[in-house]
Image (tube, rainbow, N blue to C red):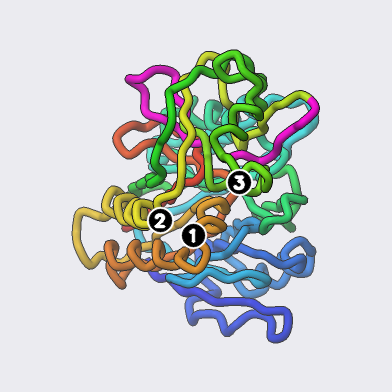
């Protein structure tokens, strides 16, 4: 596997491409600039990498190595030696079942030597929880994430062998002699009493323990409740179907004074157990190391690629410390592993010891690829 990485800026365009660009198999592009949305951007990438599958999305921070950047684009170019990739895409239509679309994408990629699927999805029009259910239908390991739009939450875009557009879901299949591992950890602390979601619909929670959800949240947040929903990023919700199930994390996106509801970045089913969570910066950084350990290859020093999908909420909470979670990933995986990725509106990954993909928030999710 040969890997090269280049950046783009509005002033100087793309940096020089690596020597193997003409025969590259895959280009991953993550962007926080309106230029990504243009047909000219895709056309230029095609001219630079004529034989490659080109896939990418808008971000809330783009990752190249241990650096995070905004207002630009970054591209990771891959030449495979013992494996191959295929790309399947679908565009979401109103009232269409996202679960069905997810299953259809996996069916399109199906082959005896399919090892893994990496997903990039619109981050605002797609219900990530339903998408994960459909992706699991194939029984193949799946990771990926929902595209971001900085902290603007306006519109997200996905590029997949065509100019970028909103409402798109892309699935990248890896086949043949390739080893793919993943790790997904959070690092948040639960606090307060365990409660039950007594009234919800999709990702909107109306009542917890029979009380208006917003009123309960405000009671726990105290003075910080004045800054809702922004302060809610520091207090995500832990939820689980039962005490024997692993907990998922949901990030607060919006509040409604009118009906006292909370809107989260993923479904919160009625009847689930829940607890509030709070920040522990050391734990957040340590969890990145745990994710890297779970995704580490069997042989030390192997050359490979690590795809990072981390949450915009983590970045906002960690501030200037955010790059430390990338540094611990690089230290754990070694310098022979290139790192690329983005900060997202949701992460798609299994827990480390099971295959079923889930929608996560506030996690560090890693996918490593080695031939």
What's the magenta region?
239-258
Q: Where is 10 relative to 358, above or below?
A: below
Which corner quadrant holds the N terminus?
bottom left
* Residue 247 belongs to magenta span: yes
**Mark 1 touching mark 2, by CB under 8 A?**
yes
Q: Where is 345 relative to 95, above or below?
A: below
Residue occupied by mark 3: 224
Residue 265 coordinates in the image, percent (x, y) = 61, 37
Look at the numbered disc 2 and give the secondary structure of its residue: helix
Look at the numbered disc 3 and give the secondary structure of its residue: helix
Estimate how packed mark 2 is, as few (under 14), some (14 to 19) or many (20 or more) residues with alpha carbons within 10 Å. Answer: some
Q: Label 1, label 2: how many angstroms apart (C-alpha)? A: 7 Å
Which residue is rendered at x = 68% and y = 71% of the image? 71
Image disc number at residue 318: 1
Q: Label 1, label 3: how many angstroms apart (C-alpha)? A: 17 Å
Residue 72 coordinates in the image, percent (x, y) = 65, 72
Estimate how packed mark 1 is, as few (under 14), some (14 to 19) or many (20 or more) residues with alpha carbons within 10 Å. Answer: many
Which residue is rendered at x = 43% and y = 25% of the image? 193
Disc nearer the start of the sequence (1/3): 3
Which residue is rendered at x = 52% and y = 64% of the image? 319
Q: Nearer the viewer's eye, disc 1 or disc 3?
A: 3
Q: Where is 176 relative to 324, above or below?
A: above
**Mark 3 touching mark 2, by CB under 8 A?**
no
Q: Label 3, label 2: how many angstroms apart (C-alpha)? A: 18 Å
Q: Choose between 47 and 37: the one closer to the eye.
A: 37
Residue occupied by mark 2: 281
Q: Choose between 222 and 63: the one closer to the eye.
A: 222
Q: Residue furthest left?
A: 299
């Amino acid at each position: 596997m040969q890997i090269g990485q280049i950046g783009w800026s509005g002033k100087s365009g793309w940096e020089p491409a690596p020597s193997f660009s003409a025969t590259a198999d895959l280009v991953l592009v993550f962007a926080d600039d309106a230029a990504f949305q243009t047909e000219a951007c895709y056309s230029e990438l095609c001219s630079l990498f004529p034989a490659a599958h080109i896939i990418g999305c808008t971000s809330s921070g783009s990752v190249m190595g241990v650096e995070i950047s905004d207002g630009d684009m970054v591209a990771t170019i891959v030449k495979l030696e013992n494996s191959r990739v295929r790309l399947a895409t679908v565009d979401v239509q109103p009232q269409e079942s996202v679960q069905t679309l997810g299953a259809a994408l996996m069916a399109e990629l199906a082959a005896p030597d399919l090892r893994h699927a990496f997903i990039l999805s619109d981050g605002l029009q797609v219900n990530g929880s339903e998408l994960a259910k459909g992706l699991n239908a194939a029984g193949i390991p799946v990771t990926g994430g929902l595209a971001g739009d900085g902290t603007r939450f306006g519109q997200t875009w996905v590029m997949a062998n065509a100019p970028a557009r909103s409402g798109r879901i892309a699935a990248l299949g890896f086949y043949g002699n390739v080893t793919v591992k993943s790790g997904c950890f959070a690092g948040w602390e639960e606090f307060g009493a365990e409660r039950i979601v007594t009234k919800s619909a999709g990702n909107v929670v109306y009542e917890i323990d029979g009380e208006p959800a917003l009123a309960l949240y405000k009671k726990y947040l105290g003075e910080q409740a004045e800054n809702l929903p922004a302060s809610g990023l520091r207090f995500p919700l832990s939820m689980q179907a039962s005490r024997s199930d692993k907990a998922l994390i949901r990030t607060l996106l919006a509040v409604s004074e009118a009906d006292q509801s909370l809107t989260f970045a993923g479904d919160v089913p009625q009847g689930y157990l829940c607890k509030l969570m709070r920040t522990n910066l050391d734990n957040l950084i340590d969890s990145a190391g745990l994710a890297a350990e779970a995704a580490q290859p069997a042989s030390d020093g192997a050359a490979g690629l690590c795809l990072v999908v981390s949450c915009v909420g983590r970045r906002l909470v960690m501030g200037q410390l955010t790059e430390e979670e990338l540094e611990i990933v690089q230290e754990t995986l070694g310098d022979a592993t290139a790192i690329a990725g983005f900060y997202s509106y949701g992460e798609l990954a299994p827990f480390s010891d099971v295959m079923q993909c889930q929608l996560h928030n506030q996690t560090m999710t890693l996918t490593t690829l080695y031939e």
